[in-house]
Amino acid sequence: MTPILLWLRRDLRLDDNPMLHAAVATGRPLIPVFIGDDALFAIGAAARWRYGESLAAFAAGLERMGSRLILRRGAALPALRDLVAQTGAGAVWWTRLYDPQARARDSDIKADLRAAGTEARSFPGHLLVEPWEVATGQGTPYRVYTPFWKALSARDIPAPCPAPDSLRAPGVWPKSEFLADWSLGAGLNRGADVLARHARIGEDVAQARLDWFLSDAVEDYRTARDLPGREATSGLSENLTYGEIGPRRIWSATQALLATEPGHKGAEHFCKELVWREFAYHLMFHTPDILTRNWRPEWDSFPWRDDTEDAERWRRGMTGEPFVDAGMREMYVTGTMHNRARMIVASYLTKHLMTHWKVGLDWFADCLTDWDPAANAMGWQWVAGCGPDAAPYFRIFNPATQAEKFDSDARYRQHFIAELTPDPGAVALSYFDCVPRRWGLKPSQRYPDPLIDLPTGRARALAAYADRTG
């Protein structure tokens, strides 16, 4: 009956947590642990702040159950060794991660602990299925989304496990550091107060959001999801990022709706969007270079530009293209960005401005509270044309015509761009409260002229494409 150390990472929830469910079933004392290693402090400023908020919410939930979250700063292996020695723990359990750095670290830790006589065990829980469980008829990984969707949706997805009623505490708790001392929000400076107004933090909030979506918004989801001026999406990306809600809980609830209303277009399409996340992890697991290099190596010779003054205008939401700038400003104010806007801003940077997708990928990683390494990489490469399931390169999103189609009443653009209306709202004005002071931006400034003529930018991109394909 030695304690089990539960090493928490991106599984900060009690509900639908396979590792926690299995641990409770043993009847052994449980010690939840979170380690602030270099990987935590290497992520972007917005994601790091949001991680801290999630940790605080999860710790509060544990305390309500008579448990607690033990915090340790430093490299994971020495921290776990130290905790094993202090507590007499006979096991260390964790939920799997799939990026190459985490896999290498976890593999080394598992081998070291086992060699020392400590049980080390990893569990699923971050995905619907493990990346190696879905393969083509030839046993190879999928490279195209549609057949991947068909294969995964035909599988029996395990039912979510319930939250425990209680967690058995150890006789003596090890010492813990204080979350506030880690200063996880320091990189945001004044921006944290703005983001806090929009973040939906913790598993209770995530579950309530899912319930609202499936009862009120999913009916029109298939079409309305592309309208950024409407609240028509689940908004659960940030909660999935930190594991505040499990993907199997989302899948199960949506499938229950489909069981009562077969052929429900909104619910079916929502499932497909959830599986896009699975596809991103499938690709990252089998082709980890997608995080840093062109997924299609034939694009290595494409003449993208590196970081430039044009890219800086893009970063600041000052391109003069309202749909692009609204998306960028939404990201600074809320920490997230509507998916339609993500495609527009990415296309504009990589095609109209001919800037390398890694410039955008790195900026999103620093600014998104729902940053996810797999989804971020796949999304940028998909839009740029060098990734999986890529649209043909000549499919270049025109931000002006996209605005006419998906924001015809300009609600979205005016909501986030103060200069477009004589009476801007608080959300649009808050952009100036959260961006770096060194940018020197203020609401009274004139909205800039377009950075580039859209037909000219399109023609330049097409000419570069023609030269590459020869």
Image (cartoon, helix red, strand yellow):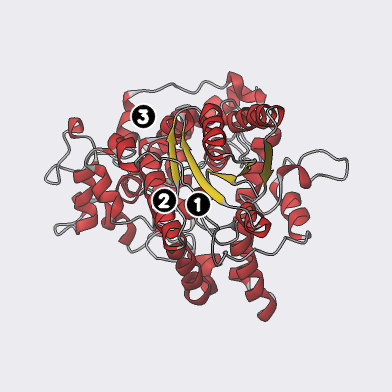
Disc 3 target residue: 311
Residue 231 location, x and y as percent?
A: 40, 65
Disc 2 target residue: 54
- Mark closer to the chain start, 3 or 1: 1
Above or below, 96 relative to 117: below
- Residues at badges 2 and 3 in contact (C-beta under 8 Å)? no
Residue 317 location, x and y as percent?
A: 30, 40
Snapshot quadrant of residue 48: top left
How far apart marks 3 and 1 lie (CA) works out to: 36 Å
Q: Nearer the viewer, residue 312 or 460?
A: 312
Identify which amino acid the numbered label 3 is placed on: Ala
Front label number (2 vs 3) = 2
The local crowd at label 2, few if under 14, some if 14 to 19, many if 20 or more residues have their Cα within 10 Å, is many
Residue displayed at 45% across by 67% down: 209
Residue displayed at 48% across by 46% down: 343
Left or right: residue 324 versus residue 300 is left
Identify which amino acid the numbered label 1 is placed on: Leu
Above or below, 217 relative to 160: below
Residue displayed at 69% across by 28% down: 111
Q: Say which mark, if any, is on residue 12.
A: 1
Q: Say which mark, if any, is on residue 256.
A: none
Q: Residue lying furthest right in this view? A: 138
- Mark closer to the chain start, 1 or 2: 1
Q: Residue lying furthest front in this view? A: 171
Front label number (3 vs 1) = 1
How far apart marks 1 and 2 lie (CA) works out to: 7 Å
- Residues at badges 1 and 2 in contact (C-beta under 8 Å)? yes
**SS for callout 2:** helix
